[in-house]
Image (tube, rainbow, N blue to C red):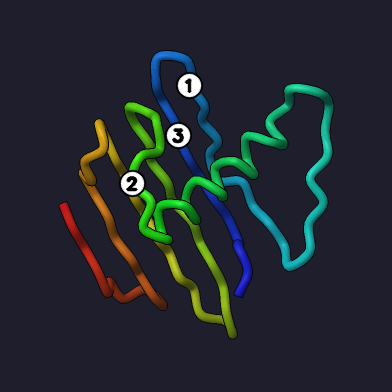
Amino acid sequence: MYIKSISFKIKSDEINWKIENLEFNKINLISGKNASGKTRVLNSIFTLIHLMRGGSNIGVEEFSWSIKLIENEIDYIYDLKIKNQVILYEELTIDKRIYFFKK
């Protein structure tokens, strides 16, 4: 399984980050100038991993995520929106079928 694309938005008093539809391949190299967003992309992935492992406090006011994973030609899409530590929206779609939805 590998990440095909991600979109995320993180907002707090100090942070306002947004990346839309960043696409990946099976093997990737993230490079760029200083302050161009390399660490931001990795931190967004680590934040989602933290949440998926049961972590709760991500220290931001608003967080939204969309990730597309691929395994054996099957698409897995996970969307999540959190505001003030409350899940506003969550959906898991596997091969175009909704398996989990919370609003």
Q: Which residue is mark 3?
A: 9
> Which label's residue is closer to the chain start, 1 or 2?
1
Secondary structure under badge 3?
strand
Image location (x, y in percent) of residue 60: 38, 29
Image location (x, y in percent) of residue 20: 53, 39
Q: Residue at x 21, y 63 (%)?
A: 101
| Amino acid beneath label 2 | Ser
Q: Residue at x 83, y 39 (%)?
A: 31
Q: Which residue is mark 1?
A: 16
Image location (x, y in percent) of residue 82: 29, 40
| Amino acid beneath label 3 | Lys
Mark 2 Cα-neighbour bin, 10 Å: few <14, some 14–19, many ≥20: few
Mark 1 Cα-neighbour bin, 10 Å: few <14, some 14–19, many ≥20: few
Q: Nearer the viewer, mark 2 or mark 3?
A: 2
The quadrant of the picture occupied by the N terminus is bottom right
Q: Residue at x 41, y 59 (%)?
A: 52
- Dot label at residue 56: 2
* Quadrant of res 102: bottom left
Using residue 6 as the reference point, say whether residue 82 is left or right of it: left
Image location (x, y in percent) of residue 76: 45, 70
Q: Nearer the viewer, mark 1 or mark 2?
A: 2
Q: Is residue 21 above or below residue 5?
A: above
